[in-house]
Image (tube, grey):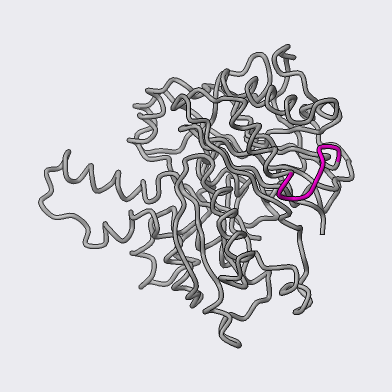
Amino acid sequence: MGAISAFGEGAEALWSGLREGQSGIRPLRHERAADLRVRIAAQVPESFDPAAHFGERALPMLDRASQFALFAANEAIVQSGLDFAAGGLGGRTGVVVGTGVGGETTQDEQSRRLYAENATRLHPLTIVRLMINAPASQISMAHGLRGPSFAVASACASTNHAIAQAALMIRAGLIDVAVAGGTEACLSYGALRAWEAMRVLADDTCRPFSANRRGLVLGEGAGVFVLESMAHARARGAHILGVLAGVGMSADAGDIVAPDPAGSGSAMTQALADAGLSPEDIDYINAHGTGTPANDPTETRAIHAVFGAHAPKLAVSSTKSMHGHALGASGALELVAVLGALRDGVVPPTANLDVADPACDLDYVPNQPRALKVRAALSNSFAFGGLNAVLAVRAA
């Protein structure tokens, strides 16, 4: 696995920060920050230098979202030890990348030139930078991966939907290996203004499941994973980080923004069934947990409905309290947390959970990490539009 996040470069930097209960939320860095009401975000540190990672010919074609995706993919592929040039493996490897808004930075910059500066010519690479499939294409080109490659866009569930598609293609025998995950670089001036208009942003920090929660905090980053069948992994002696045991997907078919516990519960139930796991097999849920008034009680009700008497025994946490809400990339950052919990036997906390909320009555692992042997876990992602995707992961 590979990642880049508010905790810096690399999956281990992300996991170490989450495991220790640290926060990546900082004052917003933006050239027009003084014009905005939003004051905080979980941004990739300024120390990230794209020129240090990408060549002079490649860099002009990479929007910030593609930079993040390619950085994370490079790390994951190196860790996997796979040689895509050997034995035609590149032709049997696919790429699926989830993103909510794609090349938003390019879109915003070029729109400003067009409408505010009355420019008559835009950057010649505008299209190839902003198109939503650009991160998948860049990964495919960089590593010679010639299997099915495409983008998945389902807002905040994009990563989990992308990983589900990759897993299903492997199961179907279409490919042997998939490079899959999510990326987002959504902190443009236009996007920040749009999120302000929704009035769902917190002005101090992110407090999922806490009675004094004030909304979500935007973040950015990417997480990418190398998936392969168990037979393929074992045949080459791979170091297996975890087993993607099942996936569940559903749609609320209701309101565009108000979540429905029946829809999210259906996705969790499907993930358990697909994995062949019972509710009692699950020790940990990485919750969607945005910190908004609507999401947290709804997710709590859905967990109660699915897990019944086992619900109070679950460790549930929202790591968005630390890495922010990276929209389409959130599921990727959260899968790093799930794999870390399975590997190290440590559940990351829900930071800033200070005040009990009667409507949120599960064990949310408040503020401090917890030593816990995690046999299997769910990772929940629920999106505006009522689109739900849940991954069931068990220890290798």
Location of the C terminus by quadrant is bottom right
In-front residue for pair 213/118:
213
Q: Position of residue 321 (x, y in %)?
A: 64, 32
Q: Position of residue 104 (x, y in %)?
A: 36, 46
In-front residue for pair 363/39:
363
Q: Is residue 148 above or below residue 211?
A: below
Magenta segment boundaries in residue numbering: 273-280
Q: Is residue 39 above or below residue 182?
A: above
Taking the spot 79% from the left edge, 52% from the top edge, the residue there is: 394
Q: Is residue 353 above or below residue 29?
A: above
Taking the spot 63% from the left edge, 22% from the top edge, the residue there is: 298
Location of the N terminus by quadrant is bottom right
Q: Position of residue 142 (x, y in %)?
A: 47, 73
Q: Is residue 278 magenta?
A: yes
Taking the spot 51% from the left edge, 65% from the top edge, the residue there is: 95
Looking at the rendering, which quadrant does residue 330 occupy? Answer: top right
Looking at the rendering, which quadrant does residue 197 occupy? Answer: top left
Q: Is residue 344 left or right of residue 228?
A: right
In-front residue for pair 355/275:
275
Farthest-out residue, bottom: 87
Q: Is residue 210 magenta?
A: no
